[in-house]
Amino acid sequence: MKVSPYAYVAPFFLLFCAFGLFPLIYTAWVSLHEWTLLSDVHTFVGLGNFGTLLGDAYFWNATFNTLSIGVISTVPQLLLAIWLAHLLNRPLRMQTFFRISLLLPNVTSVVAVVVIFSQLFGRDFGLINWVLGWFGVGTIDWAAGTGTSHVAISVMIMWRWTGYNALIFLAAMQAVPRELYEAATIDGASNFTQLRRITVPMIRPTIVFVVIVSTIGAMQILAEPLLFGGSSVTGGPDRQFQTLSLFVYEHGFTKFDFGYASAASWIMFLFVVLAAGVNYLLTRRMKGGL
């Protein structure tokens, strides 16, 4: 009885040490060296890679692109996910069908998603430009501009993850006492008022969790900008949509500069730790206030 619980959780920690903790520590060691596959000599440079990285304009450009795409995709996505979950939390016919349908975009291959949306956002024969033409909007080269490319990539991310987050919100809403909604209905509160006054305050910890997880996911965006740019690791000719993951991929697997790429990876890791810390502080404060 005393040993069995540790035996149950041991496989996870063994796998984490082998595929998570060890690569993390080894990457930190590599980041302190001039480490390239083009040479067998790995010169120790200390924090030199980090100093060069902080002065690299391309790195900060990738950071800005990552934050921009993350904000544009996360904020509308979470608002829509909460609204969809609120609708599915009410008595509806074929509830199971609608709930399963929300997961279909998430299980679809990301390659297929990007290929289809790249055609939709095509400059000459894209459906989006064709619809915008009805309102007098000229042809938009979505991949050429910084803002337009961020919007196009954000739409892909929203389409894939909105339904998934909606199911997480729906699971939290299921725990909200039905008596609160019944009392609000008797008092004449509208659906939007019930969502704003009852649902959102009751699922605040879940909202914080989803926001932080979505933020962490936004830091790791790779496939969408890579395929949207025609497998270009620079994120377009002007690096207009190169993310941090693409920046690491460019230096690690095209220039084979693993020391520099490892330093960039550790900066990304610090961003993730910062987001997790904010999550902990907000959740603890909310628990204290509820």
Image (spheres, rainbow, N blue to C red):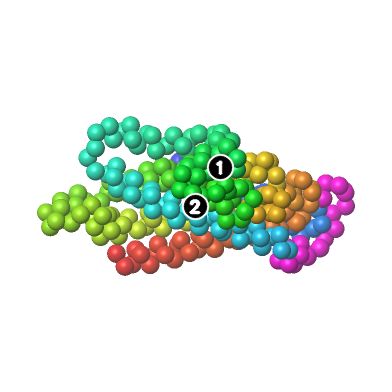
Question: Which residue is nearer to you in this view: 140 or 46?
Answer: 140
User: What residue is drawn where x is 15% and y is 53%?
Assistant: 185
Residue at image location 58% in from the left, 37% down from the top: 125
Which of the image's four quarters has the C terminus?
bottom left
Horizontally, residue 129 falls left or right of residue 266, namely left
Residue closest to the eye, 45 or 138: 138
Tell me if mark 2 has few (under 14), some (14-19) or many (20+) residues whose alpha carbon lies within 10 angstroms of its own. Answer: many
**Horizontal side, residue 68 vs residue 75: left or right:** right
Q: How many marks?
A: 2
Residue at image coords 56%, 42%:
121
Quarter in which the N terminus is drawn: top left
Instruction: Name the residue tied to disc 1.
Output: 121
Question: In what element is the residue under mark 2?
Answer: helix
Point 42% across, 43% down: residue: 164
Q: Nearer the viewer, residue 143 or 285?
A: 143
Q: CA distance from mark 1 to mark 2?
A: 16 Å
Residue 101 in the image: state x and y as whole percent: 38, 34
Q: Magenta part of the protein: which range?
A: 36-55
Q: Nearer the viewer, mark 1 or mark 2?
A: 1
Q: Secondary structure at mark 1?
A: loop
Q: Quadrant of residue 46?
A: bottom right
Mark number, residue 73 = 2
Question: Residue 213 location in percent, x, y?
Answer: 48, 52
Label 1: few (<14), some or many (≥20) within 10 Å? many
Residue 140 visible in this rendered orientation of the protein: yes
